[in-house]
């Protein structure tokens, strides 16, 4: 994704949706989106770290805010939405995998928003 430039396309698109004034939110949202196809929250975090650093230099916000927003996005989406994490208990209890993923998504959105709010404290 990095070689093809897909990471920066997703980041620019999210930045355009959210607005330049809310670039920490855009960084977290880009991390939330990119952690799923990358299939690893750590890899998505490392891939987007240069973007967070570049956005922090010209925005007036500190690098810590961008780093925490990026961590909130990548870790909440990967740990709660990605099917590998809930797959074992789902199959163990015989639950419907699609419902578990949807419930994980529903649980991850408020946690992501809470992570964004706590990162700006």
Image (tube, grey):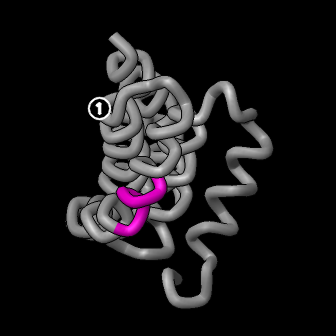
Secondary structure mostly taken by the magenta-highlighted segment of the chain: helix
Q: Position of residue 79 (x, y in %)?
A: 30, 53
Q: Position of residue 120 (x, y in %)?
A: 39, 17
Which residue reaches farthest top? 121
Indicate left or right for 80 with 57 as reference: left
Please state the extent of the stretch shown in magenta in the rendering.
47-51
Q: Quadrant of residue 6?
A: bottom right
Identify the residue at image location x=37%, y=65%.
Answer: 44
Q: Would residue 100 be seen by someone viewing this image from the given angle?
A: no
- Category of crowding for the residue at label 1, using alpha-carbon neighbours closer than 10 angstroms: few (below 14), some (14–19), many (at least 20): some
Under circle 1, the secondary element is helix
Identify the residue at image location x=54%, y=37%.
Answer: 58
Q: Count up the numbered dots.
A: 1
Which residue reaches farthest right? 17
Q: Position of residue 109 (x, y in %)?
A: 51, 34
Query: Compared to 6, does 71 lie above or below?
Result: above
Identify the residue at image location x=67%, y=26%.
Answer: 21
Query: Compared to 65, does 86 lie above or below?
Result: below
Which residue reaches farthest bottom? 3
Query: Compared to 21, does 41 lie above or below?
Result: below
Q: Would residue 101 be seen by someone viewing this image from the given angle?
A: yes
Q: Position of residue 13 (x, y in %)?
A: 75, 55
Residue at label 1?
A: 64
Quarter in which the C terminus is drawn: top left
Indicate left or right for 64 with 26 as reference: left
Judge whether residue 121 is colored magenta: no
Q: Which of these two is toward me, 71 or 101?
A: 71
């Amino acid at each position: 994704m990095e070689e093809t430039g897909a990471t920066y396309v997703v980041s620019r698109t999210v930045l355009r949706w959210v607005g330049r004034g809310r670039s920490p939110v855009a960084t977290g949202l880009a991390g939330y989106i990119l952690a799923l196809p990358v299939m690893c929250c750590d890899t998505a975090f490392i891939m987007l770290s240069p973007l967070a650093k570049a956005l922090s230099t010209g925005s007036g916000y500190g690098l810590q805010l961008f780093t925490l927003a990026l961590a909130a996005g990548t870790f909440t989406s990967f740990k709660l939405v990605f099917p590998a994490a809930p797959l074992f208990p789902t199959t163990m209890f015989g639950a419907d995998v699609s419902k578990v993923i949807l419930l994980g998504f529903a649980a991850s959105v408020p946690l992501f928003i809470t992570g964004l709010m706590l990162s700006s404290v």
